[in-house]
């Protein structure tokens, strides 16, 4: 049993719904029963969202030790079923994290991260004819919280999320870095070259 879950700070809030005491107690009890020894949970945020009967969402965010954040959400036609499934997702991700940690022993295998060569394009190469110009649209924007991580920690962070990449402050090189999942199952990492200048 994870003793760290005792008196765990759990915040339950509602969006488009007033959180009843029964809903609050149900979510808190389920989270307190997450008896996993790693990663250690520091605090939990639960957001319950009921837009309509067929779309009842439970989003749970775990803030854990070692800069680990685990986020899950589930939508169903019952808020309690959504909480249950989100808890199951959390347990799977926490087990996955621990398994990967045991395999890597806190350090990545030699050569497990492939670096991509940087290319600098001239301004002329970016111009198109009027017929070719298409105005791009930003269809989604969100705040992204960067964390100081070692590359192996970034790999585990990526494994825990459903994203295809993670942006982080590389604690090893002290640079901004982007880690992404390659099609061959390995990982690539991009870091800016401080000595290069844009053309």
Image (tube, helix red, strand yellow):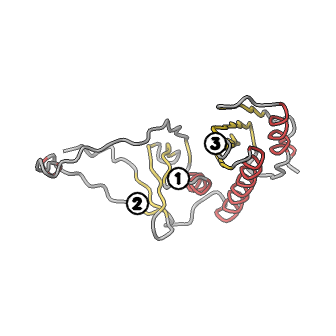
Measured in 3D between alpha carbons, the distance from the residue under mark 1 to the one under mark 2, in whole angstroms, is: 19 Å
Q: In this view, does 27 lie to the left or right of 15?
A: right
Residue beneath the point at 55% across and 41% down:
148
Do callouts 2 and 3 mark residues in contact (Cβ within 8 Å)? no
Mark 2 and mark 3 lie on one chain; the one further toward the N terminus is: 3
Percent of width and height locating residue 152: 57, 56
Percent of width and height locating residue 21: 84, 31
Q: Give the residue at mark 3.
A: 67
Residue beneath the point at 78% across and 45% down:
80
Q: Which of 165 and 162 is in front in this view?
A: 162
Q: Nearer the viewer, residue 40 or 93?
A: 93
Do callouts 1 and 2 mark residues in contact (Cβ within 8 Å)? no
Which image quarter: residue 160? bottom right
Q: Helix, strand, or loop for circle 2?
A: strand
Residue beneath the point at 48% across and 53% down:
165
Q: Is residue 95 left or right of residue 110?
A: right
Q: Give the residue at mark 2.
A: 115
Q: Give the residue at mark 1.
A: 163
Measured in 3D between alpha carbons, the distance from the residue under mark 2 to the one under mark 3, in whole angstroms, is: 24 Å
Q: Nearer the viewer, residue 20 or 190?
A: 20
């Amino acid at each position: 049993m994870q003793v760290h879950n005792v008196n765990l700070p759990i915040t339950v809030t509602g969006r488009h719904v007033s959180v009843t005491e029964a809903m609050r107690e149900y979510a808190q009890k389920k989270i307190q029963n997450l008896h996993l020894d790693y990663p250690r949970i520091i605090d939990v945020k639960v957001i319950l969202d009921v837009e309509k009967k067929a779309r009842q969402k439970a989003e749970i965010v775990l803030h854990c030790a070692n800069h680990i954040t685990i986020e899950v959400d589930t939508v169903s036609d019952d808020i309690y079923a959504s909480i249950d499934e989100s808890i199951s997702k959390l347990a799977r991700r926490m087990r996955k994290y621990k398994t990967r940690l045991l395999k890597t022993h806190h350090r990545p295998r030699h050569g497990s991260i492939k670096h991509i060569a940087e290319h600098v394009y001239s301004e002329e190469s970016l111009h198109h004819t009027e017929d070719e110009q298409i105005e791009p649209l930003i269809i989604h924007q969100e705040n992204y919280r960067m964390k100081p991580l070692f590359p192996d920690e970034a790999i585990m962070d990526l494994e825990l999320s459903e994203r295809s990449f993670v942006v982080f402050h590389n604690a090893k090189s002290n640079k901004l870095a982007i880690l992404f999942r390659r099609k061959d199952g390995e990982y690539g990492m991009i870091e800016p070259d401080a000595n290069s200048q844009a053309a």
